[in-house]
Image (cartoon, rainbow, N blue to C red):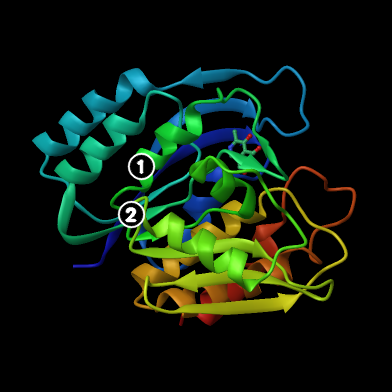
Amino acid sequence: MDKKLLTIQDISCFGQCSLTVALPVISACGIETVILPSAVLSTHTAGFKNYTFRDLTDDMSSIEKSWLDNDLKFDAFYTGYVCENQIQPILNIMQSCAAPGAVRIVDPVMADNGKLYPGFNADFPQKMAQLCNGADYLLPNMTEAAFLLGEECRLEGYDREYIENTVRKLHSLGAKNVILTGVSFDDKYLGCAVSDGKKIEYDFNERLSRCSHGTGDLFASVFAGAIVRGKSALEAAAIAADIVYCAIPATPEEHWYGVCFEKVIPDIVKLLK
Ligand code: PXL
């Protein structure tokens, strides 16, 4: 049977992030993609005014029950932007709806550029840390890593030892493989550290002169697709980084709210053939 992946994150109706990226991208990877919306927003929360926000926590356990009644099981779980009270319901679903050998991919979406996203309370990172416990693949950016560890956020001026200590501490939250994104030791290259708990490897691309909103969700979606298609963590991270590297220049500069991932879907299909 073909593999099925369940992704749990919000629907931002407008804004090219979370589920509106994950569903097409993981489908393009050739994987049946099942969705569980954590919330429905009119837009994402980074730069739009007066966004609506409907938290769907109350629906989670009845959706889980319906899936169990129909004996629906998933080979992979990929969580992204989730709400304050959803950690335990999501842990329940990842246990009750798991096919044998199911993998958990956790992107602890909650912060970037040194700050928590609007709407998350200061204790949310501790809750998110509970979701990281048992993750097969944990994908924080540098800011999320610091929040998960309760440490001050360092976005530049660090060395390999700092990264390797950070990765070690992330493993101690209970994650098997850690993929730390946004790592850079100089002006020229930007990439990620990939660790299985024994060795740390790096993947770098040339740093682009601008960044785009939504690249974290694109990276995690391609990564999740590549893992389910049988790639190693380092291969999956390198493919995901290459796709992001192509998507940013394909995005017009005035397109400030998201990344034009549609333009790189043919590249995703090609890289995973
Ligand atoms: O891209 C991460 C993300 C996901 N979902 C919502 C967001 C953000 C980032 O701002 O606001 C609702």
The relative height of residue 268 versus residue 61 in the rendered view (above or below) is: below
Q: Is residue 262 above or below residue 271?
A: above
Q: In this view, does 239 lie to the left or right of 1?
A: right
Question: Residue at 46% across / 82% down in the picture?
Answer: 273
Near-viewer residue (232 or 3): 232
Q: Looking at the figure, which quarter contains the N terminus?
A: bottom left
Whole-percent x, y for residue 85 in the image: 38, 23
> Relative to residue 79, is residue 85 depicted above or below?
above
Q: In this view, does 45 lie above or below 187?
A: above
Q: Do labels 1 and 2 touch, CB within 8 Å?
A: yes
Amino acid of disc 2: Ala
Residue type at mark 1?
Leu
Where is mark 2, residue-wise?
135
Image location (x, y in percent) of residue 130: 35, 39
Estimate the x, y position of residue 265 in percent, counting from the top left.
60, 67
Q: Is residue 88 left or right of residue 48?
A: left
> Residue at 67% across / 77% down in the picture?
204
Measuring 57% from the left and 52% from the top, which residue is drawn there? 217
What percent of the width, then of the height, locates residue 171? Answer: 39, 59
Mark 1 lies on a secondary structure that is helix
Q: Name the residue under label 1.
A: 131
Q: Does the residue tagged 1 have its C-beta within 8 Å of any atom of ligand 1?
A: no
Q: Name the side, left or right, on which 256 lies relative to 119.
A: right
- Whole-angstrom CA distance, mark 1 to mark 2, is 7 Å
Dividing the image into four equal quarters, which quarter contains ligand 1? top right
Q: Can residue 67 be seen in this view?
A: yes
**Badge 2 element:** loop
The answer to whether one can see residue 27 in this image is no
